[in-house]
Structure formats: C-alpha cells, structure tokens
C-alpha cells in the first residue's frame, strides 16, 4: 500500500510539473492573455461561454483502477464573467447548466450546475508576475467527479478559497505564462471539503494563437455526508484563436487521467470569448 500511494503521489507531481492550471484573464486593451492571478483593469472585462460533452462507462475504484460502471452522458453549458471594479478588485460570476443522463435505476439530473459568484483581490503585481487571493460562493449541483457512482448524492453549497500566482516568460520570439492555484472548498451539510490544485501553461506560437495545457486536481478531506474519500486529476489541452481584438474561439478536450472513488470524464469542449 505504501508503494502504491507513493506511486500516485509521484504521478501527480509529474502531472503538476508538466502542466500549469486554470482560470484565464484577457487584457482587454491589448488582446493578450494573462494568467488568472492577474486582475482585470478597472472598467474592463471578459465573458466566456463554453459547452462540453462527456460520457463514459468507466470509473476509478478505491485502488485507483478503472472499473466498469453504468454508462452516463453529461452536457455542460457554462458562462464565466470577470469585471475589473478597481485596481485591486475583480468581480467574478460563473453560471452553469448541467444535463446528465443515466439508465434506470440510476438518477438523472437536469438543472443548475455548480455556479459561482466571487471576487479576486490583488496582493502583488509587477510586469512579470502577480499574486492574488480569490473567494467564491458556489451553489449546490451535480458533479461528475464526486463519487464512484456519479451524481449521487448531490453536492451542497460551498465556499471556495484559493491563492493564485502567475508569471510571464518568453521563449525566443514566443510569449507565454505559467500559473498555479491552490485552495480549499468548504461544503455545507457536513459534506467533506476538498483540497484543490489547478495549474496552467500557456504559450503563443503566433500572435493570434494561444496553446493551453491545464490540469485540475481535487483531493477530498475525509468522508461523510454520503461521500467516501476520493480524488481526481484531469488534463485539459486546448487552443484559443483570436478572431479579432474582442472575439476568440477555444477548442479542446479533457480527460480524467487518475482518481480514487471517482468517475472518469472524457470529451470535447468549445468556448467563445468576448472582451470589453
């Protein structure tokens, strides 16, 4: 058991070292992309509308092995809004809609996904780096990764707290950025919380094209409220193409590469970005 646990930790470290995670902010004045640790300029903002499809007949058991489970399909429609209120404060809203289908007797779900409203506070900023703190309130919603039997029980409302750090860099004539987010999510209803690590690596091979490699990880803090101890680690490569200074198109995919007592997600995603 000790060797197996050490192998999982080593695999997670390799994943985290190779990718660098979530939450992108676009500078509306220049049309360039920055990591989420940076705040939006006052009076500027962005809206991202995205859709994703996933389905699987596999899940990760208590030993981290893939096992057959009843098939499921999930359609997600999400929005993400950021608005710079001041030099040190950016407001955030992320509504979501989920449609989940499973064969009886398993429960299906259609309705509000885990939506969020929150704010990001700047702690440090220079020309090359930024550090910030983010807090958000999340609504209840079904989640594909919470249990071995997907979507049961339903997740309660939550408070999400995280620190973000990002840095810009150059490779030859290409610009890029790396960003890391680390946080904890507190759930109501005596449901166990979870540690979060999101990482993003972004690189522009051309002025109009941004290539992203992202990872998202969750590790539950114990069990309770109908939940067992679980964890999951997801990779998400994508490309964002600037159609104009205001509009961009994102195309990519995602896959849950490892987990314990959690469902596996696999599918494509498409997003449209608008800057104002």
Image: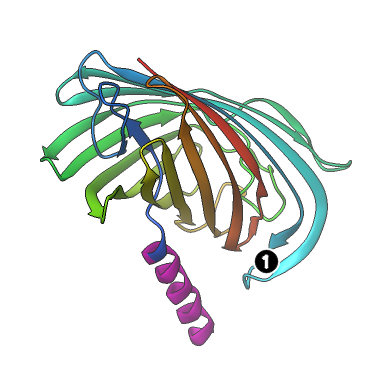
Above or below, comparing residue 234 to residue 61 in the picture: above
Q: Secondary structure at mark 1?
A: loop
Name the quadrant of the C terminus: top left
Picture residue at 61% right of the left edge, 41% below the top = 143
Q: Residue at x 62, y 70 (%)?
A: 64
- In the foreground, 272 or 15: 272
Q: Is residue 8 magenta?
A: yes
Q: Residues within 10 Å of mark 1 (few under 14, many from 20)?
A: some
Q: Position of residue 136 (x, y in %)?
A: 36, 31
Q: Is residue 219 magenta?
A: no
For residue 60, above or below residue 186? below
Label the magenta part by its dominant secondary structure.
Answer: helix
Point 30% across, 43% down: residue: 162
Looking at the image, which is closer to me, 251 or 151?
Answer: 251
Q: Position of residue 221 (x, y in %)?
A: 44, 56
Which percent across, then down, holds residue 228? 59, 57
Quarter of the N terminus within the rendering:
bottom right
**Highlighted range, magenta:** 1-17
Residue 227 seen by the camera: no
Q: State how many labels appear.
A: 1
Residue 254 lies left or right of residue 17; in this view the side is right
Q: Is residue 73 above or below residue 70?
A: above
Q: Is residue 121 left or right of residue 127?
A: right
Q: How is the image coloured?
A: rainbow
- Residue assigned mark 1: 61
Q: Is residue 271 left or right of residue 52?
A: left
Q: Is residue 104 left or right of residue 259?
A: right
Residue 256 position in % (x across, y down): 60, 56
**Which residue is at the far bottom?**
3
């Amino acid at each position: 058991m000790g060797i197996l646990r050490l192998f999982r930790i080593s695999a997670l470290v390799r994943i985290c070292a190779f990718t660098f995670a979530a939450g992108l902010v676009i500078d509306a004045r220049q049309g360039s992309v920055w990591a989420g640790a940076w705040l939006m300029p006052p009076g500027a903002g962005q809206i991202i509308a995205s859709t994703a499809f996933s389905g699987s007949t596999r899940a990760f058991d208590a030993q981290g092995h893939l096992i057959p489970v009843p098939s499921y399909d999930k359609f997600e429609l999400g929005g993400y809004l950021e608005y710079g209120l001041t030099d040190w404060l950016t407001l955030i809203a992320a509504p979501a809609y989920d449609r989940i289908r499973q064969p009886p007797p398993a429960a299906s779900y259609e309705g509000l996904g885990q939506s969020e409203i929150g704010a990001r506070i700047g702690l440090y900023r220079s020309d090359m780096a930024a550090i910030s703190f983010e807090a958000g309130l999340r609504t209840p919603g079904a989640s594909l990764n919470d249990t071995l039997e997907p979507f049961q029980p339903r997740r309660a409302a939550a408070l999400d707290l995280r620190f973000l750090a990002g840095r810009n860099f150059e490779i030859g004539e290409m610009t890029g950025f790396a960003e890391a987010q680390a946080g904890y999510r507190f759930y109501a209803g005596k449901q166990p919380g979870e540690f979060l690590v999101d990482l993003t690596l972004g690189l522009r091979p051309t002025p109009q094209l941004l290539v992203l490699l992202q990872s998202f990880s969750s590790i539950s803090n114990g069990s309770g409220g109908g939940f067992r101890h679980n964890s999951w680690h997801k990779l998400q490569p994508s490309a964002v193409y600037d159609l104009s200074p205001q509009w961009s198109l994102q195309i990519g995919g995602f896959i849950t590469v490892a987990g314990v007592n959690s469902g596996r997600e696999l599918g494509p995603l498409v997003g449209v970005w608008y800057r104002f």
